[in-house]
């Protein structure tokens, strides 16, 4: 039996948003945003939120690595479309967090793409999973819906 597809999400399903300006180079030969670029959108939105909220450092402080990511494409997006990436936390584990994300084109209320992104909190010294401090867990919980 085929797996049931998740319903298409709406803006109201997300706790935070990150605006991104699409670029000409994001388009592929078919005239729409290349599939791999969506993963960059997700990474940019999550990283910007973590940096803004003091939950990640570029040279010191908390460090995260991507363990898993996925995307379901629903409607075309192309340059010069303005987009916003919706962001919410689906699950917080001992050392990992699973984000759910969506790409919204212009004023559209329904997602053009939706996906997930799992980060693992790691030690800067050995890059091994490291339990998240309670302060990080609490701040991440602000994104839960």
Image (cartoon, helix red, strand yellow):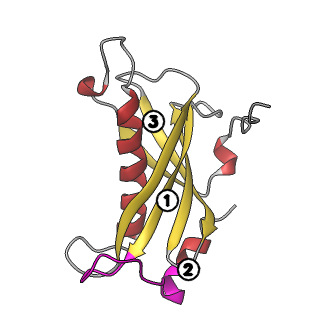
Q: Mark 2 or 3 closer to N-term?
A: 3
Q: Nearer the viewer, mark 1 or mark 3?
A: 1
Q: Which mark is residue 118?
A: 1
Residue furthest right as drawn: 1
Image quarter of residue 119: bottom left
43 in relation to 30, above or below: below
Q: Secondary structure at mark 1?
A: strand
Q: Quadrant of the C terminus?
A: bottom right
Residue that extends furthest to the top in the rendered view of this protein: 30
Tell me: residue 112, above or below residue 31: below
- Whether residue 90 is visible to the viewer of this picture, yes or no, is yes
Q: Main secondary structure of the magenta part?
A: loop
What is the distance, in whole Å, between disc 2 and disc 3 at their CAs? 32 Å
Identify the secondary structure beneath mark 3: strand
Q: Which residue is mark 3?
A: 83
Question: Mark on residue 94?
Answer: 2
* x then y, percent, for residue 65: 36, 64
CB under 8 Å between callouts 2 and 1?
no
Q: Earlier in the sequence, mark 2 or mark 1?
A: 2
- Residue 76, given in percent of the width and then of the height, sits at 50, 20
- As drawn, the residue found furthest toward the front would be 1
Which of disc 3 and disc 1 is earlier in sequence?
A: 3
Stretch in magenta: 122-137
> How would you rate the neighbour count of disc 1 (Cα within 10 Å): few for under 14, some for 14-19, many for 20 or more?
many
Residue located 55% across and 61% down the image: 98
Contact between marks 1 and 3 (CB within 8 A): the answer is: no
Query: Which mark is drawn over residue 69?
Result: none
Assign a secondary structure to mark 2.
loop
């Amino acid at each position: 039996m085929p797996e049931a597809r998740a319903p298409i999400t709406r803006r109201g399903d997300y706790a935070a948003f990150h605006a991104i300006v699409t670029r000409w180079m994001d388009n592929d030969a078919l005239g729409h945003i290349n599939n791999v670029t969506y993963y960059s959108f997700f990474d940019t939105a999550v990283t910007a939120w973590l940096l803004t909220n003091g939950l990640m450092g570029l040279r010191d402080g908390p460090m995260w690595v991507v363990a898993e990511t996925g995307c379901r494409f629903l409607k075309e997006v192309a340059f010069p479309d303005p987009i916003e990436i919706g962001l919410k936390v689906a699950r917080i584990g001992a050392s990992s967090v699973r984000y759910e994300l969506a790409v919204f084109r212009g004023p559209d209320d329904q997602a053009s793409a939706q996906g997930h992104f799992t980060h693992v909190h790691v030690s800067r010294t050995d890059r091994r999973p490291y339990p998240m401090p309670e302060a990080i867990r609490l701040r991440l919980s602000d994104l839960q819906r």
